Image (cartoon, rainbow, N blue to C red):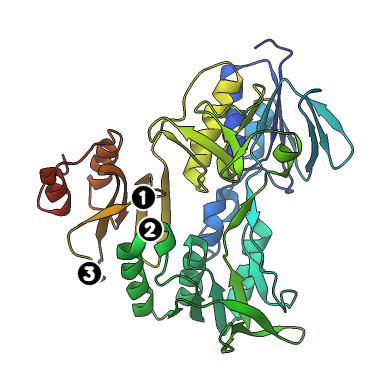
Amino acid sequence: MSEKTTYLIVGAGLAGARAAEALRERDTSGRIVLVGDEPYLPYHRPHLSKKYLMGKRPLERVFFKPPEFYAERHIETLTGRTAIGLNPQAHEVTLNDGSVWRYDRLLLATGAEPRRLNIPGNDLAGIYYLRTIPDSDELRAAMAQSQQAAVIGGGFIGAEVASAFAQSGVHTTLLFREDLLLSYHVGPIVGRFLTDYFTQKGVTIRPGVNVDAFIGDDRLRGVRLASGEIIPADTAVVGAGVIPRIALAHQAGLAIEHNGVAVDEYLQSSDADIFAAGDMAAAWSPLYHRRMRIEHWDVARQQGRIAGLNMAGDRVPWSELPYFYSDLFDLDIQAYGDLFQWDDVIQRGPADPSARPALTVFYLYQNQLRGALVINPAEGQLEAIQALLKTVPTLSAADRARLADPTMPLR
């Protein structure tokens, strides 16, 4: 690209930051402008429901890079600004301050926002959602004062927040629609393991329920289930999933698929000068031969960098293994590959939530090995699993038996 090239990045999360970093590596003279709607430079959101929430990680270690990183690389940062208009024909983006920015290459990395419960009482004090640094700060303060907490949602955010509250000594009830904790995401084997483990840790598990109202006067005092039962709570945290922020792309007429901006393996949209990455991108995976929209930190990290390289003229495909992690009490959970489309599982060894519980589950689709989830991995196990998953093997009966037997090597 020429020195007049302007790269505009809308969305100052991890994907946007990684794109800016890659762009400057590839193009030393182009103009790079990073626009974010929060008053912060890019930061790592996973910490907000884990160590930062529990006061075990200082704020400065939440940020992707220090301020001088951007200044030294001549990356312009526009914080507290929201893109409200996109004109692909004119190559222009309008911000909420009235300014209009022209681009040669544009990255949309606007992420997602929490799905809010539109039920009676949703404006009461004591109800929290978690997405931003101030959200986590407010929740930490509430956790220090709370006696009874209701966490709504059986996904990773709900599980992580419930873990944090329980470890802080708060009586915690975890409510969700599914039969088992996290089973919507990782299936019944892991779901049963985690449900039993959380119960052992003192969390009250209420599966198969729907919340239809928050109860209280000015402040929350409970949540009401569809059955009419009221769960006492002075704090409620909602982790009911997220909604991708694709309004800008939709307005501009970009192709949409899986409720995200449809992009190819190079993260390029239906408009050749517009790329997308992260939670709001439905990207083609050459590894799995389908388009995937994945709401995980590491995928945003991967895709942001690849989008940046390709905006600068490279042709690098997004062919990496999807990855995510979670910390629940003393459980180290690591997952690789495609856990979003599977029709069979193989459990490696017994699932025993003992003093040092461990579990490995492999996920298959049409007898191809697609993904794996490991709880408290053994030394060297993750490297072997990643190497195996990258080949997307079709399994023989002997292969299946080997994967199920913890005394046998994985390869």
Compared to 118, does 327 lie above or below? above
* Residue at horizontal 66 percent and vertical 38 percent from the top: 67
Q: Quadrant of residue 120?
A: bottom right
Point out the tag, 3 or 1, that comes first from the N-terminus: 1
Res. 26 image quadrant: top right
Look at discs 2 and 1 and give the one toward the viewer. Answer: 2
Disc number for residue 335? 1
Cα–Cα span, label 3 and label 2: 17 Å
Rendered residue at 51%/18% (across/down): 315
Return the residue nearer the eye: 15 or 295: 295
The foreground one among 54 and 405 is 405
Residue 125 screen position, x and y as percent: 73, 77
Instruction: Quarter of the image for the N terminus: give it.
Output: top right
Q: How many marks?
A: 3
| Separation of marks 3 and 1 at Cα, in angstroms | 19 Å
User: Residue 221 shows which numbered tag?
Assistant: none
Disc 3 marks a residue whose amino acid type is: Asp
Residue at the far right: name it.
Answer: 98
Helix or strand or loop: what does disc 2 sit on? helix
**In this rendering, the label closer to the viewer, 3 or 2:** 2
- In the rendered image, which quarter contains the C terminus? top left
Q: Earlier in the sequence, mark 3 or mark 2?
A: 2
As helix, strand or loop, the secondary structure at mark 3 comes to loop
Horizontally, residue 395 falls left or right of residue 183, namely left
Please tell me whether residue 67 is drawn above or below residue 361 in the rendered image. above
> In the image shown, does 304 or 69 lie closer to the viewer?
304
The amino acid marked with disc number 1 is Ala
Tell me the residue at 61%/76% (across/down). 236
**Which residue carries the number 2 mark?**
186
Q: Label 3: which residue? A: 352
Sequence order check, earlier mark of 2 and 1: 2
Question: Vertically, is 266 above or below 145?
Answer: above
